[in-house]
Image (cartoon, grey):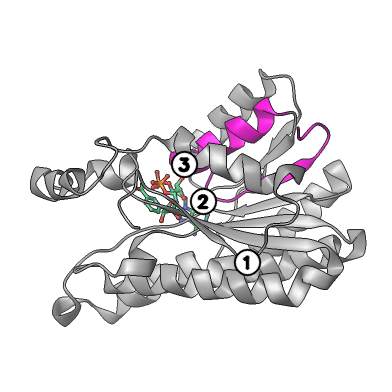
Amino acid sequence: MLKGRTAIITGSGRGIGKAIAMKLASYGANIVINDIPSSEDADKTCEEIKALGVDSIVVKGDVRKKEDVERLISETMDKFGKIDIFVNNAGITRDGLMIRMSEEDWDLVMDINLKGAFNCIKAVARPMMKQRSGAIINIASIVGVMGNPGQANYVASKAGLIGLTKTTAKEFASRGIRCNAVAPGFIRSAMTDVLSDDVKQKYFDSIPLGKFGETENIADVVAFLASDMSKYVTGQVINVDGGLVM
Ligand SMILES: NC(=O)c1ccc[n+]([C@@H]2O[C@H](COP(=O)([O-])OP(=O)(O)OC[C@H]3O[C@@H](n4cnc5c(N)ncnc54)[C@H](O)[C@@H]3O)[C@@H](O)[C@H]2O)c1
């Protein structure tokens, strides 16, 4: 389905990003793993991907930094000569009630989750516009649609990412570039492992399908949005949440 395509996934050393990288590789795409400079996971993931029979490189860098993002794009172009798929997955949380939230925690989350995606879309748009094709997929969150107490910074960043998705879709559609978002619900990963049992139970009780999501559930939908099977789909937000938001 994706044989010979080139995909970059930010923050793909572990968690949802890694699952996306493995899934796209299983459909034949060559993979560029990006994660923070200190990530050891990124190198391990790259080896696991090569074992699937596709080519893979690691380009470490911080999505907040324009020069790191430029290097991510240029090293990918040097190696593969094109970029077909770009997944904005890197993201963090710094939770706390708004009244106590520090300016630093607000800025950090906005910088990584939203400005990071802006930096990446701007940089990847150039080669994609030249190719007159490309699929950009942004990993948002259902809380960006419904709000969530204790996550003002994170919710604002994900709501912003949804707006950015729609604007990107409108600005680049005429160049053959599609842009969609996936909004995960509660997915079992390092990000959700740290939540209290109380919070986990509350989520669990509101999931109609009666189970937490797995990273692979997100990867399946990203693979669809990355492929020609979704060639008439752009500007959409697909909730992958066991029915939590309807
Ligand atoms: N787990 C969930 O339930 C859930 C729900 C909704 C949305 N999401 C979103 O899915 C994405 C992945 O989350 P996850 O659960 O796999 O979390 P995770 O913490 O396991 O993975 C995030 C990855 O991003 C990397 N990263 C962080 N800052 C970065 C930066 N500045 N530059 C490059 N890479 C950076 C981390 O090193 C890590 O490898 C995030 O955008 C998150 O907001 C997760």
Specify whether 132 is left or right of 39: right
Residue bounds of the magenta highlight:
1-27
Residue at 63% in and 40% down: 223
Query: Residue 139 appears at what percent x and percent y?
Result: 50, 55
Q: Which quadrant of the structure image shows residue 33?
A: top right
Q: Is mark 3 within 8 Å of ligand 1?
A: yes
Q: Considering only order in the chain, which callout, 1 or 3, is on the residue closer to the N terminus? A: 3
Instruction: State the CA–CA distance, disc 3 to disc 1.
Output: 21 Å
- Disc on res. 16: 3
Q: Which quadrant of the structure image shows residue 63?
A: bottom right
Q: Which quadrant of the structure image shows residue 21?
A: top right
What quarter of the picture does the C terminus occupy? bottom left
Residue under pointer 2 = 36
Q: Residues within 10 Å of mark 3 (few under 14, many from 20)?
A: many
Q: Residues within 10 Å of mark 1 (few under 14, many from 20)?
A: many
Task: Give the vertical position of 219 relative to 177 (above or below).
Answer: above
Q: Is mark 2 within 8 Å of ligand 1?
A: yes
Instruction: State the CA–CA distance, disc 1 to disc 2.
Output: 28 Å
Q: The residue under label 3 is which amino acid type? A: Ile
Q: Considering only order in the chain, which callout, 3 or 2, is on the residue closer to the N terminus? A: 3
Specify whether 183 is left or right of 246: right
What quarter of the picture does the N terminus occupy? top right
Mark 3 element type:
helix
Query: Does the segment drawn in magenta span residue 14?
Result: yes
- Disc on res. 235: 1
Q: Is residue 56 visible?
A: yes
Mark 2 element type:
loop
Which one is in front in this view, the residue at disc 3 or the one at disc 1?
Answer: 1
Residue at 63% in and 70% down: 119
